Image (tube, grey):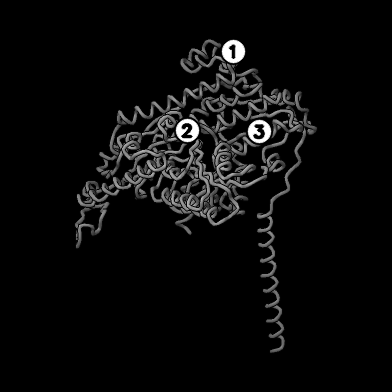
């Protein structure tokens, strides 16, 4: 009997060992599958087909697997601007590509700088005598700007054009806070530093309103100049100034109004558009109505990797709000980006560094960590350039100060040199519900700041002095960078935002140009005769990428894209903005160098809603973990 028991134990042990071995092999196979790169598909002779069913961004967001699973909603697809531009420009000289085709029916838009850069890339295709065809149901500002750079723009018979221009709704909470008897304790420096105004005013201050209007008018003028230069025969005036009359003059048919004004060239549905493309590049053999020979973006980029000749110029991206910790990509986690930059310092593989900044700022501490990391690269003797994208304001300008050369675009929003801190207290709210507090202290700072019982005058004085000292430090960084006095910088600082053109005149920016211009300058400064940009990025989790790709596929079928649906979707951005404002008030995130006006455009707010929601899910995931 004992022998049988021994044999049984041996068999059980063998079974357990085999199960464990099979589990290890299974998970190893899963990891290998997720880590491996699929072989790229074949580029077909025909069109480069860009179905932009999401937003154009500076840096695609990455989310944790837990946040993706908890969100209950797939993330919106995101298309990195440099990938789009590289694919389009490469297609201009590729004999296999006969045309470039854009489907913008579910396009969420992009920043003014990003849209202008993609439009310029389309111009290169046209210059190569290749057709550029665009279609959409509803053309908003960004979509109609891209359509202006096409050789043939199509609109659906049920579609139309909605040109709203930059701007939107600004939210103010002072009345609500007064009703709830919540006190917003605000400490700031800067006449124009409006990031705290929603908590202490019922409207914008005259100074902030004037500064914002000046920037929006400059960006708006750049938009009008671009579309008129790209499509000079089109008449945009009535659609902008009196859209109701513009549509009424076409018998209430918005698609015909767009056609008669020259904004589009043809009216037709998706199948008619596809058949037109097929006439130019050839019909697809699968027999689907309106199908044409085409290669999609991912396949084309895999077939045409970026060249790597000559010396490498490191490019590190600071995109999104600057926050403490290792958040991102898509959000500029200060520790994460500082680590990437320190990797350049430790390596001998790079000739120079370009910091690509597309951020409204955020945490002062995180901004300083990024700035200090750039200074360490500079101390090594490497040339430093900054390339500003759509926004490089407040903390976005803070991280730019070590640069020897700053490049920006005319529509870049920059400046906002100012600092603030804000947190709520409930000393007047709690007694309304029968809750009272008693302060026991051994020093003036005991238990402070007391969000329930209120802060003391001494604490308030310390906080204000810290903010003022930090602002003085900010002025010093800018003055040293720009070769001016702190008094000179204070005159253009005070939290005021500037458009890229004005910033150049004021000396906050050195010259106009994109990231390629910044890379070329830095490479030449390093003495390189040949060079290439080497984008330094954080490694993504293979499992998170796998989940994101699966869920993004589901996001291709969203809500109604007709006129009513598009206009309603814009207002969704207000929900995300309310969430962000409340978080800014209650988070206790320390001193901040943040530009509120940079996010005042409803068109820019709507595409960020999915990212905001997943950000909240990521926060929940950290709590659960």
- The image's mark for residue 260 is 1
> Quick one: 92 or 19, which is closer to the camera?
92
Picture residue at 50% right of the left edge, 43% below the top: 319
Picture residue at 68% right of the left edge, 29% below the top: 100
Instruction: Quarter of the image for the N terminus: give it.
Output: bottom right
Dot 3 or dot 1, earlier in sequence: 3
Residue 528 image offset from top left, x and y in percent: 61, 44
From the viewer's perspective, tell me whether residue 249 is left or right of residue 14. left
Q: Nearer the viewer, mark 3 or mark 1?
A: 3
Q: CA distance from mark 3 to mark 2?
A: 23 Å
Q: Given contact means CB atoms under 8 Å apart, are the residues at marks 1 and 2 in contact?
A: no
Residue 583 image offset from top left, x and y in percent: 38, 45
Instruction: Decide: few, some or many residues near mark 2? Use Cα within 10 Å; few <14, some 14-19, many ≥20.
Output: many
Q: Given contact means CB atoms under 8 Å apart, are the residues at marks 3 and 2 in contact?
A: no
What is the number of callouts on the image?
3
Q: CA distance from mark 1 to mark 2?
A: 33 Å
From the viewer's perspective, tell me whether residue 466 is left or right of residue 16. left
Decide if residue 150 is in sight here: yes
In this figure, which residue is indicated by the disc labeled 2? 412
Picture residue at 40% right of the left edge, 47% below the top: 363
Does dot 2 land on a helix, a strand or a loop?
Answer: loop
Residue 557 image offset from top left, x and y in percent: 60, 36
In this figure, which residue is indicated by the disc labeled 3? 88
> Quick one: 528 or 51, which is closer to the camera?
528
> Quick one: 561 or 352, which is closer to the camera?
352
Dot 3 or dot 2, earlier in sequence: 3
> Quick one: 57 or 496, which is closer to the camera?
496
């Amino acid at each position: 009997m004992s022998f049988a028991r021994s044999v049984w134990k041996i068999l059980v042990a063998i079974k357990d060992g085999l199960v464990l071995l099979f589990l290890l092999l299974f998970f190893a196979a899963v990891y290998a599958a997720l880590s491996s790169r699929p072989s790229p598909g074949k580029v077909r002779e025909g069109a480069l087909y860009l179905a932009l069913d999401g937003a154009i961004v500076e840096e695609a967001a990455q989310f944790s697997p837990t946040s993706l699973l908890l969100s209950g909603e797939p993330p919106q697809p995101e298309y990195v601007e440099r990938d789009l531009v590289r694919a389009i420009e490469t297609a201009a000289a590729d004999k296999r590509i006969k045309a470039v085709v854009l489907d913008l029916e579910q396009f969420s838009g992009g920043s003014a700088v990003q849209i202008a850069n993609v439009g310029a890339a389309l111009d290169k295709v046209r210059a190569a005598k290749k057709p550029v065809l665009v279609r959409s149901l509803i053309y908003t500002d960004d979509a109609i700007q891209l359509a202006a750079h096409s050789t043939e723009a199509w609109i659906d018979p049920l579609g139309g054009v909605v040109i709203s221009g930059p701007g939107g709704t600004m939210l103010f909470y002072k009345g609500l806070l007064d009703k709830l008897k919540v006190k917003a304790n605000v400490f700031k420096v800067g006449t124009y530093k409006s990031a705290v105004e929603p908590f202490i005013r019922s409207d914008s201050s005259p100074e902030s309103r004037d500064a914002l209007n000046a920037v929006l008018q400059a960006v708006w003028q750049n938009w009008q100049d671009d579309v008129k230069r790209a499509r000079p025969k089109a008449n945009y005036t009535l659609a902008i100034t009196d859209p109701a009359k513009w549509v009424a003059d076409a018998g209430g048919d918005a698609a015909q109004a767009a056609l008669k004004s020259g904004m589009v060239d043809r009216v037709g549905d998706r199948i008619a558009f596809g058949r037109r493309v097929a006439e130019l590049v050839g019909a697809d053999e699968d027999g689907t109505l309106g199908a044409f020979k085409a290669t999609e973006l991912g396949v084309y980029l895999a077939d045409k990797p970026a060249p790597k000749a000559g010396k490498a110029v490191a490019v590190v991206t600071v995109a999104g709000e600057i926050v403490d910790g290792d958040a991102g990509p898509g959000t500029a986690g200060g520790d994460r980006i500082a680590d990437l930059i320190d990797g350049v310092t430790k390596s001998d593989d790079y000739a120079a560094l370009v910091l690509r900044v597309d951020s409204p700022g955020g945490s002062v501490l995180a901004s300083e960590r990024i700035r200090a990391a750039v200074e360490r690269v500079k101390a090594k003797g490497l040339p430093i350039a900054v390339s500003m994208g759509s926004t490089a304001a407040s903390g976005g300008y803070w991280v730019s100060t070590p640069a020897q050369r700053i490049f920006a675009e005319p529509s870049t929003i920059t400046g906002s040199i100012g600092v603030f801190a804000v947190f709520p207290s409930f000393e007047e709210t709690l007694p309304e519900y029968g809750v009272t507090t008693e302060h026991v202290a051994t020093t003036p700072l005991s238990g402070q700041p007391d969000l329930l019982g209120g802060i003391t005058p001494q604490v308030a004085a310390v906080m204000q002095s810290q903010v003022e000292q930090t602002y003085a430090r900010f002025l010093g960084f800018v003055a040293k960078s720009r070769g001016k006095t702190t008094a000179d910088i204070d005159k253009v600082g005070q939290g005021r935002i500037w458009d890229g053109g004005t910033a150049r005149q004021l000396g906050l920016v050195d010259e106009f140009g994109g990231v390629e211009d910044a890379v070329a300058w830095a490479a030449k400064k390093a003495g390189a005769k040949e060079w290439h940009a080497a984008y330094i990025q954080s490694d993504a989790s293979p499992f998170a990428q796998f989940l994101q790709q699966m869920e993004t596929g589901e996001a291709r079928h969203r809500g109604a894209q007709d006129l009513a649906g598009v206009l309603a979707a814009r207002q969704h951005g207000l929900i995300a903005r309310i969430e962000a404002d409340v978080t800014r008030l209650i988070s206790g995130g320390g001193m901040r160098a943040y530009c509120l006006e940079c996010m005042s455009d409803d068109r820019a707010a709507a595409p960020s809603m999915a990212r905001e929601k997943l950000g909240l899910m990521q926060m929940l995931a950290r709590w659960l973990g």
